[in-house]
Amino acid sequence: AVVWGAGRTGRRWVRLLEAEGVATVALIDINPARIGQRWRGIPIYAPSELAARAPGWIQNRFRIHAAVASRGARQDIRRALRSLGLCEGSEFLMVA
């Protein structure tokens, strides 16, 4: 999986996925302090890197899980992912 959200909600979602045997290969976050870092070995990327990375993730059957709690963020994420031609439900999910 790829998890959009490297804050508390996203990290909690990563742990839930791990408990179900699903590995997270990348995190997406808007916080400049997190971008370029790693959390538990998982690289954190900026949303601007999605256009280059998402096709490979989707080709390898990684689903993007948007796990954020910030007000209004879900709509922004949904818009960003749809603008890349990704389909909600099969290629990305709004979770948590």
Image: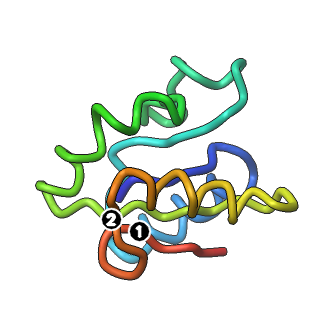
Please determine whether, in this image, residue 19 is positioned above or below residue 2: below
Question: For this view, does 35 lie left or right of residue 3?
Answer: right
Inter-mark Cα distance, 2 to 1:
5 Å
Query: Is 38 or 48 nearer to us in this picture?
Result: 48
Q: Position of residue 28 (x, y in %)?
A: 52, 41
Residue name at image x 17 percent, y 44 percent: 56
Quarter of the view holding residue 51: top left
- The amino acid at mark 2 is Arg
Its colouring scheme is rainbow
Residue name at image x 40 percent, y 60 percent: 64
- What is the secondary structure assignment of the residue under circle 2? loop
Residue at the extreme bottom: 89
Question: For this view, does 8 lie left or right of residue 37?
Answer: right
Residue under label 1, please give it.
92
Residue name at image x 28 percent, y 36 percent: 53
Q: Which mark is residue 63?
A: 2
Query: Is 8 or 66 nearer to us in this picture?
Result: 66
Q: Position of residue 85 (x, y in %)?
A: 33, 59
- The amino acid at mark 1 is Phe
Position of the N terminus by quadrant: bottom left
Position of the C terminus by quadrant: bottom right
Q: Position of residue 88 (x, y in %)?
A: 42, 76
Quarter of the view holding residue 15: bottom right
Tags 2 and 1 touching, CB below 8 Å: yes
- What is the secondary structure assignment of the residue under circle 1? strand
Residue name at image x 53 percent, y 29 percent: 46
Q: Which mark is residue 56?
A: none
